[in-house]
């Protein structure tokens, strides 16, 4: 009997720890993941707010329950004051970048900050798990680099998304500007030209922004203010120059068609100059693989048989 009690007492803490771990995991999952029946009831009652629900980006949809729960803690009394100040300082920058990248319908600024905190924990864990699976010993100096990469991963991803969308807008700008110029020179009003082009042209990143301009004008914003908002929202030099010229033409009462034609010609000239600059840089960058990779192979193929023949005939081999 005493032995049986000793066996139970020795096994008891093990099962108790397993039970506590399972209970903690259940509590965490229950508090983070939403109640599906409650969500269905809210949807039937028309109370579902889908304005900030992620729709297209897989990582946002997958981790939404986690980072949305973290974002709700920003307004909690348990959140430290220094962390609240950090969130308040970072929110305007994140909001601006999300606007440029056209991600405001996917995630709010607070949720993106919480998403960054989530990735700061998940990315190092995934990397450590991968290295552990491969049985690769991580050097000591790489541990801070892995932690820093996880902390800044979300900011790097957002910066890349901003650059990618700015490139799409710049790529679509010459064609869009040419269509606007032709429409205005044919006698159409500038707003009517924007509306027709928005209805009949293929949707691009620039047309999405022009649709926002049209919506602002329909809501009562003046054309100058809507164009000024466009230049400030995208933070692109060519778009800022384009909108400033249109605002000046609108204020001075000059012909918008002439301004559009001059801007179109200037943009085409700048595009050709950028292409020439890129070509010059490419010719310089190709010298490195040419000298160290291609030339040695060519010399071996051409001079190799001659060297071998010379060595054989000279009796050296």
Image (cartoon, rainbow, N blue to C red):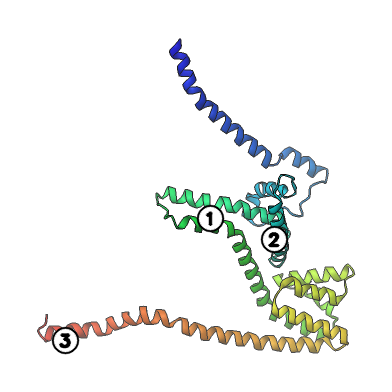
Task: Estimate the x, y position of residue 92 in percent, counting from the top left.
Answer: 73, 63
Question: Residue at 45% across / 18% down in the picture?
Answer: 7
Residue 198 lies, with reference to residue 244, above or below; the image says: above
Residue designated by label 2: 90
Secondary structure, mark 2, is: helix
Compared across the picture, whether 281 is left or right of 186 comes to left
Look at mark 1 in the image and give the residue it sits on.
147
Looking at the rendered image, the quarter that the C terminus falls into is: bottom left
Q: Label 1 to label 3, Cα distance in Å?
A: 60 Å
Mark 1 or 3, nearer chain start: 1
Using the image, determine if residue 277 lies above or below residue 143. Answer: below
Find numbered disc 1 in the image and state the secondary structure of the residue it sits on. helix
Q: Which part of the image, by quadrant, shows the N terminus?
A: top left
**Residue hosting label 3:** 310
40 left or right, relative to 12: right
Q: Residue at x 32, y 80 (%)?
A: 296
Query: Can residue 106 be seen in this snapshot?
Result: no
Between the C-alphas of marks 2 and 3, the distance is 72 Å
Could you tell me residue 176's position as x and y percent?
A: 72, 78
Mark 1 closeness class: few <14, some 14–19, many ≥20 residues within 10 Å:
some
């Amino acid at each position: 009997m005493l032995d049986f009690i000793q066996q139970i007492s020795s096994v008891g803490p093990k099962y108790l720890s397993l039970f506590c771990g399972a209970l903690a995991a259940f509590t965490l999952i229950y508090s983070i993941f939403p109640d599906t029946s409650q969500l269905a009831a809210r949807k039937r009652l028309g109370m579902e707010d889908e304005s900030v629900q992620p729709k297209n980006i897989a990582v946002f949809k997958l981790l939404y329950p986690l980072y949305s729960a973290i974002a709700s803690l920003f307004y909690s009394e348990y959140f430290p004051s220094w962390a609240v100040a950090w969130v308040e300082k970072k929110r305007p920058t994140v909001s601006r970048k999300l606007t440029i990248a056209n991600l405001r319908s996917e995630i709010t600024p607070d949720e993106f900050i919480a998403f960054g905190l989530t990735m700061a924990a998940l990315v190092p864990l995934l990397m450590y798990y991968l290295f552990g699976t491969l049985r690769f010993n991580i050097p000591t100096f790489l541990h801070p680099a892995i932690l820093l990469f996880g902390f800044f991963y979300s900011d790097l991803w957002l910066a890349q998304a901003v650059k990618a969308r700015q490139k799409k807008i710049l790529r679509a700008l010459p064609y869009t500007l040419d269509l606007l110029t032709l429409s205005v020179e044919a006698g159409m009003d500038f707003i009517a030209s924007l509306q027709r082009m928005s209805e009949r042209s293929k949707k691009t990143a620039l047309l999405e922004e022009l649709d926002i301009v049209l919506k602002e004008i329909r809501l009562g914003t003046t054309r100058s203010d809507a164009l000024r908002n466009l230049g400030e929202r995208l933070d692109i030099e060519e778009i800022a120059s384009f909108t400033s010229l249109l605002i000046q033409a609108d204020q001075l009462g000059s012909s918008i068609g002439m301004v559009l034609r001059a801007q179109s010609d200037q943009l085409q000239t700048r595009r050709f100059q950028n292409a020439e600059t890129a070509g010059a840089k490419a010719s310089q960058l190709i010298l490195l693989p040419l000298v160290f990779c291609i030339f040695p192979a060519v010399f071996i193929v051409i001079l190799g048989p001659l060297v071998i023949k010379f060595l054989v005939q000279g009796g050296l081999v």
